[in-house]
Image (cartoon, rainbow, N blue to C red):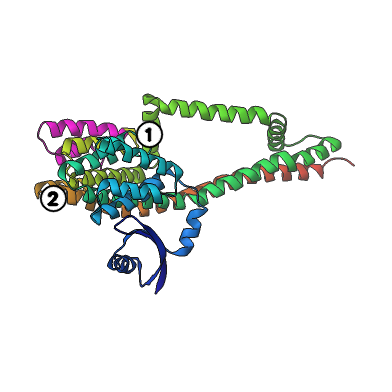
């Protein structure tokens, strides 16, 4: 049995907090619901402490907002009352202000989706479109529940990618610092000895000493050049041509990982939108917006044209040759059986699992390449110094 902390609200809007003992999270939620309260948050106490000291993000606030609003609407509370409760319990000052603004807009006669659209930094267009579809179909609580699942899966995918990239990042930083220390602190001491003894210095040593002197004397120019180059590169990436070329390069470098990532994103988004009642053409355009690689995203335009011409989605997707064959086969079966939305979610789940393996394989290949590269650089520096030391023994006393 585990102890869970919770935050809940009663039907009249009173917020209550406490702890409950249960075998797992699902059992704890059932026990809370049986006591007549509406659970808003449920977490292990240690996780709650970590959450207080962690950096907040708009994505985290959006997920929390969606989870809590879905729970309140699912319990039968009206929208304005649910938002009023959330404005009181929100831990984020920014989110509290946004919820109060949304509530004010609704009370002035705006729809929920229109009120959300006034805050594009917090609520992306796909979120607004799904809410609008839920309002039109009278199933807003169901749509929010699907949005919650979508945001949770996106969060898990992001966290997995971040976690596997931690070690390579640390490796690059530590190796880079080691090289800088060697060039700016260790080598200058040897150069003084070489100057005092005189004699010819081997070419590799001369190259390394020249690099050391340049780094020590003109480090600020090198730093400014690096920052300037980085800013120019970022500016170039913002242009349509630059972004397209950069995405083409990334696709050549790690095509398997990117294709699986974009397939999972596209299919989960499209499947969620279709399940929420969004028309296929509009859902397709929204799903295209979540694809970060412009090479793949641009190909969806041709798919949209195919849908307009009544060709469905499977055939146009096959013609653009950007998604894996297995995904295309599953989508075709889903379209033929009239279960396209469910099949898209299965495709997303399949490729999210496959993506984890692809990322591990890519990082597994990247790590030895980085280790060997850094080892060769450091080895060259050490070798050049050893050559100079050995040449010192040949100098006349």
Q: Main secondary structure of the magenta part?
A: helix
Q: Which residue is mark 2?
A: 339
Which quadrant, please, contains the C terminus? top right
Which quadrant, please, contains the N terminus? bottom left
First in sequence, mark 1 or 2: give its number: 1
Between circles 1 and 2, the one closer to the viewer is 2
Work out whether residue 210 or residue 283 is closer to the camera in this orientation and state it.
283
| Magenta stretch, residue numbers | 295-323
Q: Secondary structure at mark 2?
A: loop
Q: Which residue appears at 62% of the width and 31% of the height?
A: 223
Q: Is residue 314 magenta?
A: yes
Work out whether residue 234 or residue 120 is closer to the camera in this orientation and state it.
120
Q: Is residue 19 found left or right of 66 in the rendered image?
A: right
Q: Is residue 216 found left or right of 33 in the rendered image?
A: right
Q: Position of residue 283 (x, y in %)?
A: 21, 38
Q: Which residue appears at 86% of the width and 36% of the height?
A: 196
Q: Position of residue 75 (x, y in %)?
A: 25, 57
Q: Secondary structure at mark 1?
A: helix
**In the rendered image of this protein, does residue 336 appear above or below residue 101?**
below
> Can residue 324 be spotted in the picture?
no
Q: Which residue appears at 50% of the width and 25% of the height?
A: 232
Q: Position of residue 150 (x, y in %)?
A: 29, 49
Q: Residue furthest bottom?
A: 1
Q: Is residue 339 found left or right of 204 in the rendered image?
A: left
Work out whether residue 242 or residue 383 is closer to the camera in this orientation and state it.
242
Q: Residue furthest right?
A: 397
> Can residue 118 be spotted in the picture?
yes
Between the residue at mark 1 and the residue at mark 2, the CA separation in whole angstroms equals: 33 Å
Residue 62 lies in quadrant = top left
Disc 1 crowd rating (10 Å Cα; few below 14, some 14-19, many 20+) is some
Q: Position of residue 243 (x, y in %)?
A: 39, 29
Q: Which residue is mark 1?
A: 247
């Amino acid at each position: 049995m585990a102890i869970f902390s919770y935050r809940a609200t009663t039907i009249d809007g009173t917020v209550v907090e406490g702890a409950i003992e249960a075998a797992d999270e699902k059992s704890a939620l059932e026990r809370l619901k049986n006591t007549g309260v509406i659970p808003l948050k449920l977490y292990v106490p240690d996780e709650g402490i970590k959450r207080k000291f962690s950096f907040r993000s708009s994505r985290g606030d959006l997920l929390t907002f969606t989870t809590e609003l879905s729970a309140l609407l699912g319990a039968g509370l009206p929208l304005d009352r649910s938002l009023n409760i959330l404005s009181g319990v929100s831990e984020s000052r920014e989110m509290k202000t946004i919820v109060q603004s949304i509530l004010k807009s609704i009370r002035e006669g705006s729809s929920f989706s229109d009120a959300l659209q006034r805050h594009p930094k917090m609520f992306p267009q796909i979120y607004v479109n799904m809410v609008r579809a839920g309002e039109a179909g009278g199933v807003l609580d169901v749509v929010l529940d699907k949005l919650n699942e979508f945001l949770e899966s996106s969060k898990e995918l992001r966290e997995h990618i971040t976690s596997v990239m931690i070690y390579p990042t640390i490796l690059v930083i530590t190796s880079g610092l080691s090289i800088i220390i060697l060039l700016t602190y260790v080598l200058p001491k040897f150069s003084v000895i070489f100057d005092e003894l005189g004699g010819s210095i081997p070419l590799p040593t001369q190259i390394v000493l020249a690099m050391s002197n340049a780094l020590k004397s003109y480090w600020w120019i090198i730093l400014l050049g690096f920052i300037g180059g980085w800013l120019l590169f970022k500016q170039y990436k913002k242009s349509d041509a630059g972004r397209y070329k950069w995405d083409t390069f990334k696709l050549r470098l790690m095509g398997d990982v990117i294709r699986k990532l974009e397939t999972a994103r596209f299919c989960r988004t499209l499947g969620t939108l279709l399940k929420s009642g969004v028309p296929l053409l509009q859902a397709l355009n929204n799903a295209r917006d979540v694809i970060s690689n412009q090479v793949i995203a641009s190909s969806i335009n041709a798919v949209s044209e195919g849908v307009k011409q009544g060709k469905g989605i499977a055939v146009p997707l096959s013609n653009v040759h950007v998604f894996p064959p297995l995904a295309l086969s599953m989508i075709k079966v889903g379209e033929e059986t009239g279960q396209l939305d469910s099949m898209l979610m299965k495709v997303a789940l399949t490729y999210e699992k496959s993506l984890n393996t692809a990322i591990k394989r890519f990082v597994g290949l990247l790590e030895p390449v980085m280790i060997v590269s850094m080892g060769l650089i450091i080895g060259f520096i050490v070798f050049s110094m050893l050559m100079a030391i050995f040449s010192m023994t040949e100098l006349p006393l």
